[in-house]
Image: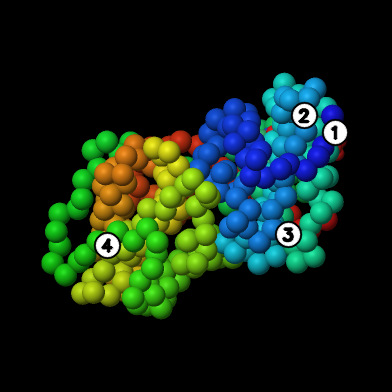
Amino acid sequence: MEVSPAQLPKDTSEIVDFVVARIPEQDRTILRSDLDGESARSLRAYVSYQRRDMLAGVSLVRTASNLPDGAAYVMVCTRADLGGRGLGSALFAAVLSDLGEHVTRLVTCVLEDDHRSMSVARHWGFQEMQSSVTTSVDLFGARVPDPIAGVTFEECADLVFDDEEAVGTMLLASQTNPEFDLGLVLELSSLRETPAPGQRPIAVLTRVGGRPAALSFAVADGDQMHVVYTGVDPGSRGRRLALFTKQALHAHARELGIRTALTENEESNTGIRRVNDQLGYARHSSWSWMMRPRP
Ligand SMILES: CC(C)(COP(=O)(O)OP(=O)(O)OC[C@H]1O[C@@H](n2cnc3c(N)ncnc32)[C@H](O)[C@@H]1OP(=O)(O)O)[C@@H](O)C(=O)NCCC(=O)NCCS
């Protein structure tokens, strides 16, 4: 089976449907965003067809401002009934054939329960870096938090603020999460770039005494959203602001017709995982973030 470059955005929906059929746990909101060339520094995708029109496998390689320096995100996916025939390696080879000069390492993400895919990724030289847990919650009962003196919740989908510098500084200071240590640094500009065409951002900024104190940002796709980030300024911690900010985000999303929220957190990040438990998030899937140096 021949491997050829995909035509994006024309092939995007077909690729998303294909990957979700192969890996039902895959969040299509994130995948659609991964396939959005507008928000990437570079993006290449490859396809392989069985006969003329039946997708057999896909791969992609992407660099973007919200990935660590020098890192390219890689994904390879083949149809389950065609596994073990060399197609995955052919699609991976296509990705490797055209890496930009600035790429020094490759990052991928594999469903932990998929032992065969984990073995193949290790065979391709990837090593486990972090374990991530995806959880989800039904937003049916989402309600705005009770008023708290001096605290306001501001809906801010476009992430444009009069005091943008102060919000940016708070966002940076709030990133005490394990992903930050791997170089996954979020800025307002990279969050703004995350939604793909057809998706929309949903965000809430919490202020204490008028000053930025916490931010929760999500990308919505249809009636589902993925909460990309929630962070509280270290100086405002211990007041349950993460919980209240996410409650405000959920309630706003519910008003907009979103029914389900998913989020992904590093396994050892007990703070946010506890908040998610309190909000009713339940385990959805576990993922291994893996990395290897550029071949
Ligand atoms: C991982 C995946 C892409 C492999 O696809 P595939 O079509 O079965 O791949 P191939 O038949 O080309 O095998 C890939 C390589 O792994 C090797 N391999 C196969 N099974 C293996 C196993 N159990 N342990 C170690 N290596 C294995 C093959 O020998 C081949 O290596 P080679 O080219 O050096 O000979 C496929 O299972 C999949 O779509 N998984 C879901 C998505 C995913 O998790 N992707 C991985 C991260 S990018």
Tell me the SS state at disc 1.
Answer: loop
Ligand 1 positioned in quadrant: top right
Give the distance between the C-alpha atoms of the residues marked 1 and 4, in whole angstroms: 51 Å
- Colour theme: rainbow
* Picture layout, residue 66 above or below residue 43: below
Examine the rendering and report whether any part of residue 271 can be seen: no
- Give residue 135's mark: none
The reply to whether discs 1 and 2 touch (Cβ–Cβ < 8 Å) is yes
**Residue at the location (42% across, 46% down)?**
220
- Give residue 2's mark: 1
Mark 1 or mark 3: whose residue is earlier in sequence: 1
Give the distance between the C-alpha atoms of the residues marked 1 and 2, in whole angstroms: 7 Å
Identified by mark 2, the residue type is Tyr
Tell me the SS state at disc 4.
Answer: strand
**Residue at the location (78% across, 48% down)?**
95
Bin the neighbour count of mark 4 within 10 Å (Cα to Cα): few under 14, some 14-19, many 20 and up. Answer: some
Disc 3: which residue: 105
Mark 3 or mark 2: whose residue is earlier in sequence: 2
Identified by mark 1, the residue type is Glu
